[in-house]
Amino acid sequence: MEIKWILIGEVVATQGNKGEIRVIPHTDFPDRFATMEEIVLFKPGSNNPELKFKLEKARLHKSFVILKLEGVDNITEAEKIRGMEIKVGTDQVVPLPEGQNYIFELLGLKVYTTDQLFLGVITEVLKTGANDVYVVKPEPGITKLKEILIPVIDEVVLDIDLEKQTILVNLLDGLLE
């Protein structure tokens, strides 16, 4: 099975002259860098690993993570990896509390109503601030809408079953119009 890679950071600059790099974390858990053994680097937007380095040390500094990679010992070598992305396999993500899911886990799930009507498949999750919204590509004939927007609230999203790859929703009036 092909590894699914998840972005957790982006190398934005060098730090000092001893080969350290400055990383903007794209994770809710920037502390995770301190426990990593290796760093896998990718060209922006790519899902093919470009470089791997053993991690010598990691520390938080303001809103950045500062990393020292084995074999990157001066500013010239560190400059070569500026702009690269740091990713981990889905098997390395930090476990979330019960009832919470990563977006990558939700994409592609089949959405059914309490009446067993198949609405379609989740293609995107919108972060609105108040609550998330699932964007569903509707099954032909369900609606004239190009997408169904499902608010992620307790009254609407009743069950998420990652094993069965399904979501059960209580469809509110007007959602298909």
Image (cartoon, grey):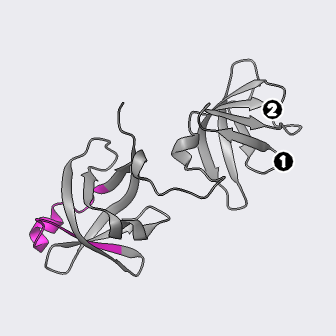
- Mark 2 lies on a secondary structure that is loop
Disc 1 crowd rating (10 Å Cα; few below 14, some 14-19, many 20+) is few
Question: Who is closer to the viewer here, 70 or 20?
Answer: 70
Question: Who is closer to the viewer here, 129 or 154?
Answer: 154
- Mark 1 lies on a secondary structure that is loop
Which quadrant of the structure image shows residue 13?
Answer: bottom left
- Which tag, 2 or 1, sits closer to the chain's start? 1
Residue at position x 26%, y 61% in the image: 37
- Camera-side mark, 2 or 1: 1
* Residue type for callout 1: Glu
Question: Who is closer to the viewer here, 96 or 81?
Answer: 96
Residue 163 at what x, y percent from top left?
59, 34
| Tag 2 residue | 176
| Tag 1 residue | 155
Above or below, comparing residue 116 to residue 158 in the picture: above
Residue at position x 63%, y 50% in the image: 126
Residue at position x 41%, y 47% in the image: 91
Residue 120 at what x, y percent from top left?
67, 27
Disc 2 crowd rating (10 Å Cα; few below 14, some 14-19, many 20+) is some
Tag 2 near tag 1, CB within 8 Å: no
Residue 7 at what x, y percent from top left?
40, 53
Which quadrant of the structure image shows residue 164?
Answer: top right
Residue 94 at what x, y percent from top left?
47, 58
Q: Which residues are magenta?
A: 65-85
